[in-house]
């Protein structure tokens, strides 16, 4: 699933291509919006809110509207010059096209495409916690929301967008490693929540201008992460363990180094509940 920095960068690219210009083509390829006409409307702005994208539109005699999209697991927006070959996937995966005289923005595999009044954006993003990359980032509020459920597993809490908007499985994994906690550590056992959320902000901020998501400071292939999708820990060389965390369908594969991240282990669960085999070369946790 794309992380908040990926969505933030997508918003910057869409804003640079579309903002301030009228749409010469608008094709929303989802049944509820198939007949909606947006041609002629001006794109006022494109902003990210956590993992949500909000494209704001205005037009003469029309109330401001927002096109809300979300990437979920594998959606994406691509920007092309008119006539340039689209390369985001087969055409049947396109869910939205927004174009002006200079650029074409093409949304692939977008599971969420909806149009709503701009004044009602709160309906789709009002539940979110502090946006790690937002202009109103509030670490104190993020700490308050984390601490509100002290018995919750840290890995689960970090992925909850109502607590901290923008952190996905990659950053959750690396945050737990860098702060030395097992993903199953209860929030109450984390001694410095302020340092944790500050680190989340630092990591996403450092990566927001590039597609690379580096947490080690080393951009060389295979060295960008400490434990995420690795066979061995970059710090101590121990085998990286994996286990599913959370209940289906929201469970995610957790990675951690048992040597560098002491603390609770995942609960014993039948193998059939682990949603299939782990990635090749990974060590599945066996209680």
Image (cartoon, rainbow, N blue to C red):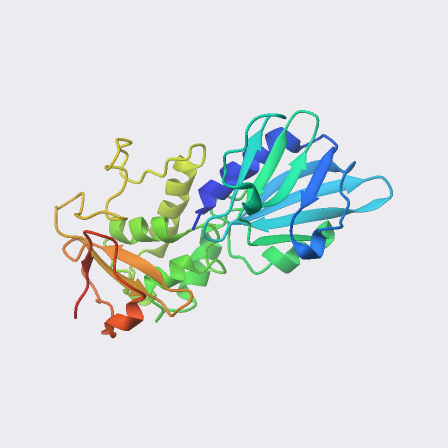
The foreground one among 216 and 80 is: 80
| Quadrant into which the C terminus falls | bottom left
Image quarter of residue 108 = top right
| Rendering coords of residue 204 (x, y %) | 41, 42
Looking at the image, is 52 positioned above or below residue 215?
below
Q: Residue at x 36, y 67 (%)?
A: 246
Question: As drawn, is 205 to the left or to the right of 91?
Answer: left
Q: Residue furthest right?
A: 61
The foreground one among 99 and 229 is: 99
Image quarter of residue 150 = bottom left
The foreground one among 146 and 7 is: 7
- Residue 235: in sight, yes or no? yes
Q: Residue at x 37, y 53 (%)?
A: 169
- Residue 23: in sight, yes or no? no
| Rendering coords of residue 16 (x, y %) | 60, 29
Looking at the image, is 97 positioned above or below residue 269?
above
Give the total of numbered labels: 0
Looking at the image, is 249 positioned above or below residue 4?
below
């Amino acid at each position: 699933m794309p992380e908040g920095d990926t969505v933030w960068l997508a918003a910057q690219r869409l804003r640079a291509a579309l903002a301030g210009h009228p749409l010469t083509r608008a094709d929303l390829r989802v049944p509820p919006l198939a007949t909606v006409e947006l041609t002629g409307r001006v794109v006022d702005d494109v902003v990210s809110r956590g993992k949500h994208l909000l494209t704001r539109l205005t037009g003469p005699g029309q109330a401001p509207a927002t096109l809300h999209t979300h990437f979920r697991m594998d959606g994406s927006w691509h920007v092309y010059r008119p006539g340039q070959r689209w390369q985001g996937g087969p055409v049947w995966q396109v869910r939205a096209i927004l174009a002006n005289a200079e650029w074409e923005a093409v949304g692939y595999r977008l599971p969420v495409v909806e149009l709503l009044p701009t004044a009602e954006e709160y309906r789709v993003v009002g539940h979110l916690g502090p946006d790690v990359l937002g202009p109103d980032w509030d670490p104190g509020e993020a700490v308050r929301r984390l601490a509100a459920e002290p018995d919750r597993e840290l890995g689960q809490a970090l992925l909850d967008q109502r607590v901290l908007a923008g952190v996905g499985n990659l950053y959750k994994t690396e945050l737990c490693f860098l702060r030395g906690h097992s993903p199953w550590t209860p929030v109450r056992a984390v001694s410095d929540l302020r340092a944790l959320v500050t680190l989340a902000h630092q990591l996403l901020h450092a990566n927001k201008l590039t597609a690379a998501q580096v947490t080690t400071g080393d951009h060389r292939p295979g060295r960008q992460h400490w434990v995420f999708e690795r066979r061995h820990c970059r710090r101590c060389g121990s085998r990286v363990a994996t286990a599913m965390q959370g209940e289906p369908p929201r469970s995610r594969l957790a990675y951690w180094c048992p040597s560098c991240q002491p603390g609770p282990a995942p609960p014993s669960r039948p193998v059939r509940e682990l949603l299939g085999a782990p990635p090749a070369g990974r060590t599945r946790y066996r209680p």
